[in-house]
Every structure is written in C-alpha cells, then in structure tokens.
Image: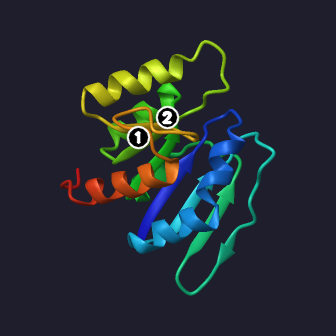
Amino acid sequence: MKRAFVTVGTTSFDELVARVVANDCVQILESLGYNHLVLQVGRGTVVPKPFRTESFTLDVYRYKDSLKEDLQQADLVISHAGAGSCLESLEKGKPLVVVVNEKLMNNHQFELAKQLHKEGHLFYCTCRVLSCPAPVSLLLVLLGSAKILQQLPSA
C-alpha cells in the first residue's frame, strides 16, 4: 500500500486541500500506485469527508500532537512550505513536494522552498503554477514529481 501524506501545518491552506482531493488529482495518485491519502487540514474551512473504496482511502484530520507516525508511513509528502514541516519531512528522508501558499504576506515560504530545491532536497510549486523549472499546473507537478521520486532509492 503506497501512502501520500499532505500537511498544511497549523495554518489554513484551503487551496491546497481542495486541489489534492479533486477527482483528477486522486486519479493521478491512484495511477501512480498510491492507494491511501492522509490529509492534515489545520484550521482551514475546506475539510473533505474521509472515504474508502476498494482501491483508495482518504483519511482527514485537523491536528495531531505529532506528525511523526504519518511522516514515517508516507511514501510521498506534499506539504505547505513551513520550515518545520519541510525540515521534519526531510529529516525522515521522505520524497517531498512543497506547495507555496502565495496568499501569505512577505512570502518567506517561497524563498525557503526555492533554496531547498536549489540544494536538491525537494520539488516546489504553487497551486497555480510550478515555480521551477517551467510553468505547469500543480496536477502535472505532482505527476512528474511522483514519477521521479518513485525512481529514487528509499532512505
């Protein structure tokens, strides 16, 4: 069972939550062999209903005391660009796609994601377009990143 874990941290990032549970995104995750999506939604207003089919499970929660277990069980982490979430994911050696929240003021998240990408630690994008290397939708970023990350040796 391949598991993707999405975290927005303690903030709200409704745009990311809505995007990753959209039917087309779930279908792409399924086509890449992911059959379990765990979604941590923080204080957002978009709270998808958990569901289970024969081929796919969506689990949803707002907060936990620790994300350690979810990170350990994840085969792919999709995260907001908060420093804590990024570093915790990287410490666990997990493939990481960071989605920058463009609505935040003084967008330090973009700078952090850009630097960590430059150092080869992660891929990054926004919900609107990929920030590097070419503009495409988040959906294509997830598809491309997941294919690349499937080829990397596990940590």
Q: Position of residue 34 (x, y in %)?
A: 44, 69
> Are the two marked residues, 1 and 2, in contact with CB atoms closer than 8 angstroms?
yes
Kind of residue indicated by mark 1? Ser
Residue 77 lies left or right of residue 133; in this view the side is right
Q: Position of residue 76 (x, y in %)?
A: 40, 54
Kind of residue indicated by mark 2? Ser
Q: Relative to 29, does residue 133 appear above or below in the rendering?
A: above
Q: Position of residue 5 (x, y in %)?
A: 50, 54
The dot on residue 89 is 1
Q: Which residue is mark 2?
A: 85
Residue 43 lies left or right of residue 60; in this view the side is right
Q: For residue 10, what is the image quadrant?
A: top right
Of residue 3 and residue 127, the one placed in the foreground of this image is: 127
Residue at (64%, 62%) from the top-left corner?
22
Q: Secondary structure at mark 2?
A: helix
Q: Tell me the distance, in whole angstroms, between the alpha carbons under discs 1 and 2.
A: 6 Å
The dot on residue 16 is none
Q: Position of residue 9 (x, y in %)?
A: 61, 37
